[in-house]
Image (cartoon, rainbow, N blue to C red):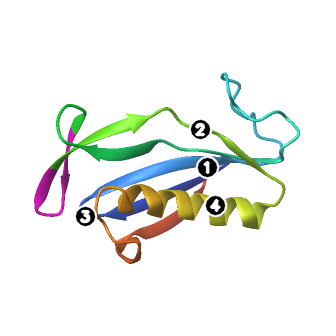
Amino acid sequence: MLLVRGEAGGTALTGTLYEPGDDPPSFEGAPDEGAPYVWVCDAFYEVESGGQVQQIGDREINVAFESPSPRGFETRDRAIEAAKEHVRTQFQRIGVSAGDVAIAIEES
């Protein structure tokens, strides 16, 4: 299992990449066992009101979360690239440049 973490603006987002031999997620909507690599991570976006207040750099924003949407991949390289892209995209959705997101991968 790999943890893919993005950090920017004083906050972070971490998702999980399940590899062959790991117990993949089993909740409704999870990919079937035929996918050797499964990426699971929150998705979020900025909202005018409600949601969760989050400090991003020098500004305070309201963030709403979507249900995690697991995605299956055939190769480890493609799964890692998709995970990085997902994390960067979430930060872009709240106004942080993708280039400002530091990505770290940790084996768990």
Give the alpha-carbon distance from disc 2 to disc 3, as whole Å.
24 Å
Q: Residue furthest right?
A: 34
Pinpoint residue 26: horizontal percent, then vertical percent: 71, 25
Looking at the image, residue 63 sits to the left or right of residue 58; the answer is: right
Q: Is residue 54 magenta?
A: yes
- Circle 3 residue: 9
The residue at 34%/72% (across/down) is 97
Mark 1 surroundings within 10 Å by alpha-carbon count, few (fewer than 14), some (14 through 19), many (20 or more): few
* Label total for image: 4
Q: Secondary structure at mark 2?
A: loop
Callout 4–callout 3 Cβ contact below 8 Å: no
Give the alpha-carbon distance from disc 1 to disc 3, as whole Å.
25 Å
Looking at the image, residue 12 sits to the left or right of residue 38; the answer is: left
Q: Quadrant of residue 83?
A: bottom right
Residue type at mark 1 is: Ser
- Circle 4 residue: 82
- Circle 2 residue: 69
First in sequence, mark 4 or 3: give its number.
Answer: 3
Callout 2–callout 4 Cβ contact below 8 Å: no
Pinpoint residue 14: horizontal percent, then vertical percent: 47, 50
The label shown at residue 108 is 1
| Residues rendered magenta in the picture | 53-60
First in sequence, mark 1 or 3: give its number.
Answer: 3
Image depth: mark 2 or mark 1 in front: 2
Give the alpha-carbon distance from disc 2 to disc 4, as whole Å.
13 Å
Residue type at mark 3 is: Gly
Q: Nearer the viewer, residue 20 or 48?
A: 48
